[in-house]
Image: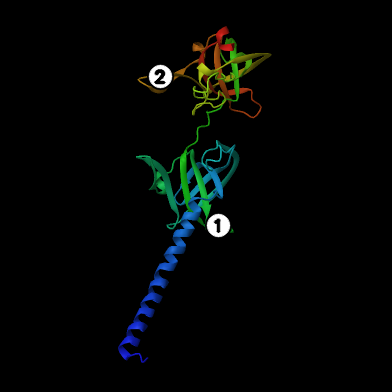
């Protein structure tokens, strides 16, 4: 069977077009696959923003305290360390945050100007030497006051110090359902996001007392709820009373001076039952 010159020319044209298409789409396919792989992989570095200067971001190196039932790397609580590291972004660095719209996860592009101190960053590198940052995912803002360093009941208040009875929180055991038709109640160990709820507290007082210094820079606050919104109200040492339940964060490594005190109501015997 003889092939005409026109058919040969047509076949050659098809081969040439197929080759051109493959050359043009292959880099895009590789890039898309790499991008998709990055989005679904563990970050190379986790940090909390300390400062931003142009294209340079200084972070406190952080780690995740735990994973949550295999739901992904974004579910653990972030714990920053004292170690810092400066990373440099370029015009090729993708900076994004995730939003939820109509039940769908969407990504919003950001720039370094959108970053703020205490932002939590998940960071991926483009190279094995970890010099070129390819992607940064902003995962909200770190709250340094989510978990108190000490809990106590105010025993004595003085002008520049307080004495507390050291306490701990015991979470109540979940009630057991007697009927299979009843849905299981939420485990008491699952603390709502944002910290402990006073309604959930079972305070156990120890025999230990501790005196904590209060400096001019110590912040004393309480929380109030108005119209469904939580607001903080600043207090002074004079506002502290005996039997106040207090959450305490320290300003020094020796844990002698309070950086922040949060008043969580008044202690009563019902709080310990």
Above or below for 252 versus 30: above
Q: Residue at x 34, y 81 (%)?
A: 13
Q: Quadrant of the C terminus?
A: top right
Residue extending farthest to the front is: 1
Mark 1 Cα-neighbour bin, 10 Å: few <14, some 14–19, many ≥20: few
Q: Secondary structure at mark 2?
A: strand
Q: Nearer the viewer, residue 120 or 182?
A: 182
Above or below for 257 versus 163: below
Q: Nearer the viewer, residue 38 or 260?
A: 38
Which of the two discs, 1 and 2, sits closer to the camera?
2
> Is 42 placed left or right of 104 in the picture?
right
Q: Nearer the viewer, residue 70 or 100?
A: 70
| Residue 62 screen position, x and y as percent | 57, 41
Q: Residue at x 39, y 70 (%)?
A: 24
Q: Secondary structure at mark 1?
A: loop
Q: Quadrant of the N terminus?
A: bottom left
Q: Residue at x 49, y 58 (%)?
A: 34
Residue extending farthest to the right is: 207
Q: Residue at x 47, y 46 (%)?
A: 137
Mark 2 Cα-neighbour bin, 10 Å: few <14, some 14–19, many ≥20: few
Residue 268 visible? The answer is no
To which residue does mark 1 refer? Answer: 131
| Residue 203 screen position, x and y as percent | 59, 15
Disc 1 from disc 2: Cα separation: 47 Å
Residue extending farthest to the left is: 6
| Residue 259 screen position, x and y as percent | 55, 25
**Tag 2 or tag 1, which sits nearer the N-term?**
1
Labels 1 & 2 near each other (Cβ < 8 A): no
To which residue does mark 2 refer? Answer: 225
């Amino acid at each position: 069977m003889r092939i005409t010159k026109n058919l040969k020319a047509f076949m050659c044209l098809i081969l040439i077009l197929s080759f051109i298409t493959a050359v043009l789409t292959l880099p895009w396919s590789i890039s898309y696959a790499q991008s998709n792989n990055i989005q679904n992989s563990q970050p190379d570095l986790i940090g909390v923003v300390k400062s931003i200067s142009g294209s340079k971001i200084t972070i406190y190196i952080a780690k995740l305290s735990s994973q949550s039932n295999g739901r992904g790397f974004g579910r653990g609580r972030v714990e920053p360390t004292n170690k810092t590291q400066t990373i440099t972004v370029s015009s090729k660095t993708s900076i994004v945050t995730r939003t939820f719209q109509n039940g769908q996860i969407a990504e919003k592009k950001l720039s370094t100007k959108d970053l703020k101190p205490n932002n939590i960053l998940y960071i991926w590198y483009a190279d094995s030497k970890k010099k070129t940052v390819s992607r940064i995912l902003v995962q909200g803002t770190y709250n340094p006051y989510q978990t108190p360093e000490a809990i106590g009941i105010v025993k004595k208040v003085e002008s520049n110090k307080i004495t507390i009875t050291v306490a701990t929180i015991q979470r109540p055991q979940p009630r057991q359902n007697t009927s299979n038709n009843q849905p299981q109640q939420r485990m008491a160990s699952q603390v709502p996001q944002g910290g402990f709820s006073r309604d959930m507290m079972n305070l156990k007082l120890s025999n230990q007392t501790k005196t904590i210094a209060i400096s001019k820079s110590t912040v004393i606050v309480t929380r109030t709820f108005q119209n469904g919104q939580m607001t903080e109200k600043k207090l002074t040492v004079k506002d502290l009373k005996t039997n106040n339940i207090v959450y305490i964060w320290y300003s020094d490594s020796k844990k002698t001076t309070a950086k922040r005190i949060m008043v969580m109501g008044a202690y009563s015997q019902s709080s310990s039952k």
